[in-house]
Image (spheres, rainbow, N blue to C red):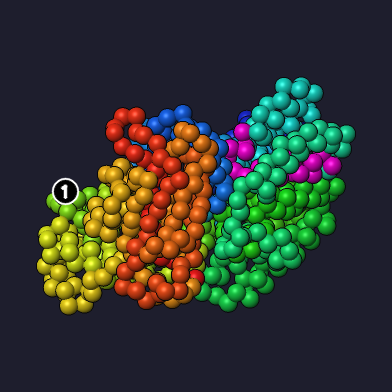
């Protein structure tokens, strides 16, 4: 394999070679800082708030954190659960340390990619080009500005670190490098599930560069196969919606879509309001240019290009079945392959051709990345201002419920939908029942689930137990007096369609059999009742969220659900689990102003600290559409 400096003129002095090498190492890091400088200062948004609410109280909590599937059946204890748990305890809601870790990890990725590229292409210049092309790829826009997608950056470190360790094993013959590669690979299962494709990427490297070493990739297939089997047959998968798997011809269409996105013009066309056809045409031109440069490249450059394309396909394969959930940040790891391929074939290509290709790629990619990072910066700081404003309102009204009106689509999905206020320690805050600015998103809960029911809101306002604030630009304005007058004329009191049994204002909807509120839920005894509005149509169902049941006598907990005295279903839940069940409703309750839902536990147990008979712990009981 050529040395790292073999592409420099023989007559170059050592200081010049050293300076050039330093430049090649520093260039990608400098580009990263310049392009993503606002990403370093982003605050929290969206899924960040869900992870910020993690708490660890016992060994059982630790086990659930390690092994219990969350967020569409994913198990990512390292990149999400431990990361947010540890940093929340150390830094609370100071976002800068979180962002610094993301950037430091990405710097490590760029250094690893540079080292790997030098060994594959035999050129420090080609390696620097590859690292620079990757760092501005559209797939990195979200991971470098949104903390929840840190898993993409950390998994890139696992892929690059593992492969580089294997390359060092081949170069030196030392099995310690191979062993450490295995350790890194196994840790990757706690980072991101797409690590299952690593053995395929390693096999592609061996077949193209070190065929005699190919057998060493085979043992790594065992943990990948076991992990894949668990996800396919043990962990429940979504039957429908955006996370449903579609292993069919749509995967080829998805492959092209991701490839065209990775090149940049298609994503640029979207934000520049250009015809999609223009972006596709430019992506085809870049593809043809890459193929032409590869055709005139030398054998080693073509091998690197083939490996890069194989990397792109292999690392993308695990998410291609998600036909209805295609996102830019899924390209973070696959785009490494595109960068390696482009960096290798440009060295022997005509300078004008390489310069034109790079110019188009950089212009489209950097423009889109800047747009995306600015949007994340803006939304995250809108969330920060909003939470600070609500915190001030809570200080003024410590014992009152706060109702919000004027909340728009962006603010709702950036903060409220993901319980951002609860993550900040702010409870008793709801959307007012007249908030009408939020458009429904497919696959997401309706905004009505975050509203205080009209009847409850009217009662709370009449008794002075609630205040109303209008939201404008992340700031709040108290409009309680005017809103109360309007609400009396516009809102109709009636039974709610959704009852959170852990909400004090909704205690009037509960019958006998309930204990006091604990956190966000409430325990019942053997039998308890909830009053809801009757369904509007025959297709509606009753949903019951049973949380934190803890049965020391049995691993399975059974309960019965009745509506107006008629049994509508029986269900069971494993001990220390959390489930949401749906039940069909009898036709005779359709259109009723109110119905009584009764829940009865098969057996109970005693609270060792208090003289209480405990059956189930419940969160929300509600009606859901067909």
Q: Quadrant of residue 222?
A: top right
Q: Residue at x 20, y 62 (%)?
A: 469
Secondary structure found at label 1 = loop
Pick whichever, 40 or 119, lies toward us: 40
Q: Residue at x 52, y 41 (%)?
A: 556
Residue under label 1: 398
Question: Could you tell me residue 165's position as x and y percent?
Answer: 70, 30
Pick whichever, 421 or 526, lies toward us: 526
Question: Could you tell me residue 332's position as x and y percent?
Answer: 60, 50
Magenta stretch contains residue 322: no
Q: Residue at x 41, y 40 (%)?
A: 604
Are there few (<14), some (14-19), or many (20+) residues within 10 Å of tag 1? Answer: few
Quarter of the figure that contains the N terminus = top right
Relative to 146, 400 lies left or right: left
Dominant secondary structure of the residues highlighted in magenta in the image? helix
Extreme-front residue of the structure: 565
Q: Residue at x 46, y 67 (%)?
A: 585
Question: Could you tell me residue 76's position as x and y percent?
Answer: 55, 41
Extent of the magenta region: 187-207
Pick whichever, 598 or 462, lies toward us: 598
Relative to 469, 14 lies left or right: right
Q: Quadrant of residue 192?
A: top right
Extreme-right residue of the structure: 212
Relative to 454, 144 lies left or right: right
* 144 to 590, vertically: above or below: above
Instruction: Answer yes or no: is residue 453 visible.
Output: yes
Question: Could you tell me residue 109's position as x and y percent?
Answer: 59, 39
């Amino acid at each position: 394999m050529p040395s790292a400096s073999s592409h420099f003129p023989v007559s170059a002095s050592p200081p010049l070679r050293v300076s050039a090498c330093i430049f090649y190492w520093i260039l990608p890091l400098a580009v990263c800082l310049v392009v993503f400088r606002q990403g370093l200062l982003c605050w929290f948004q969206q899924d960040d708030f869900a992870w910020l609410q993690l708490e660890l109280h016992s060994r059982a909590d630790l086990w659930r954190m390690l092994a219990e599937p969350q967020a569409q059946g994913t198990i990512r204890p390292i990149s999400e659960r431990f990361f947010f748990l540890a940093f929340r305890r150390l830094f609370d809601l100071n976002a800068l340390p979180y962002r610094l870790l993301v950037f430091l990890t990405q710097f490590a990725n760029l250094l690893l990619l540079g080292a790997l590229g030098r060994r594959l292409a035999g050129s420090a210049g080609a390696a620097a080009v590859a690292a620079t092309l990757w760092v501005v790829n559209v797939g990195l826009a979200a991971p470098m500005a949104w903390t929840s997608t840190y898993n993409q950056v950390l998994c890139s470190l696992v892929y690059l670190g593992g492969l580089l360790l294997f390359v060092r094993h081949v170069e030196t013959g030392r099995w310690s490098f191979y062993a450490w590669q295995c350790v890194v690979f196994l840790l990757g299962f706690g980072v991101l599930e797409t690590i299952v494709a690593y053995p395929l990427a390693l096999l592609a490297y061996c077949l193209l560069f070190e065929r005699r070493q190919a057998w060493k990739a085979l043992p790594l297939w065992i943990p990948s196969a076991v992990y894949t089997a668990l996800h396919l047959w043990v962990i429940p998968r979504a039957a429908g919606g955006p996370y449903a798997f579609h292993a069919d011809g749509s995967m080829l269409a998805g492959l092209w879509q991701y490839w065209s996105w990775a090149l940049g013009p298609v994503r640029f066309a979207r934000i520049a309001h250009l015809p999609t056809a223009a972006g596709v045409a430019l992506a085809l031109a870049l593809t043809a240019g890459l193929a032409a440069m590869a055709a005139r490249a030398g054998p080693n450059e073509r091998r690197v290009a083939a490996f890069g394309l194989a990397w792109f396909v292999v690392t993308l394969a695990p998410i291609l079945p998600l036909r209805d959930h295609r996102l830019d940040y899924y390209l973070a790891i696959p785009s490494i392959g595109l960068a390696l391929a482009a960096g290798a074939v440009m060295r022997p290509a005509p300078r004008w051709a390489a310069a034109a290709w790079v110019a188009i790629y950089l212009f489209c990619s950097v423009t889109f990345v800047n747009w995306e990072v600015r949007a994340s910066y803006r939304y995250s700081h809108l969330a920060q201002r909003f939470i600070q404003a609500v915190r001030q309102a809570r200080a003024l009204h410590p014992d009152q419920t706060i109702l919000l009106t004027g909340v728009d689509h962006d603010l709702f999905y950036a903060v409220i939908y993901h319980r951002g206020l609860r993550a900040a320690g702010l409870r008793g805050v709801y959307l007012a029942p007249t908030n009408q600015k939020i458009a429904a998103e497919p696959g997401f809960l309706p905004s009505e689930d975050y509203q205080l029911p009209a009847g409850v809101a009217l009662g709370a306002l009449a008794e002075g137990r609630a205040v109303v604030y209008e939201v404008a630009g992340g700031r709040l304005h108290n409009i309680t007096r005017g809103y109360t007058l309007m609400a009396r004329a516009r809102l109709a009191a009636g039974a709610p369609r959704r009852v959170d049994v852990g909400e004090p204002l909704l205690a009037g909807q509960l019958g006998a059999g309930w204990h006091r509120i604990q956190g966000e839920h409430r325990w019942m005894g053997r039998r308890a009742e909830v009053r809801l509005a009757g369904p509007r149509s025959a297709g509606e169902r009753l949903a019951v969220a049973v949380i934190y049941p803890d049965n020391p006598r049995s691993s399975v907990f059974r309960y019965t659900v009745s509506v107006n005295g008629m049994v509508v279903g029986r269900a069971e839940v494993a001990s220390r689990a959390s489930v949401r069940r749906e039940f069909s409703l009898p036709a005779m309750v359709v259109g009723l102003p109110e119905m009584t839902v009764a829940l009865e536990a098969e057996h109970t147990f005693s609270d060792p600290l208090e003289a209480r008979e405990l059956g189930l712990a419940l969160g929300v009981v509600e009606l859901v559409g067909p």
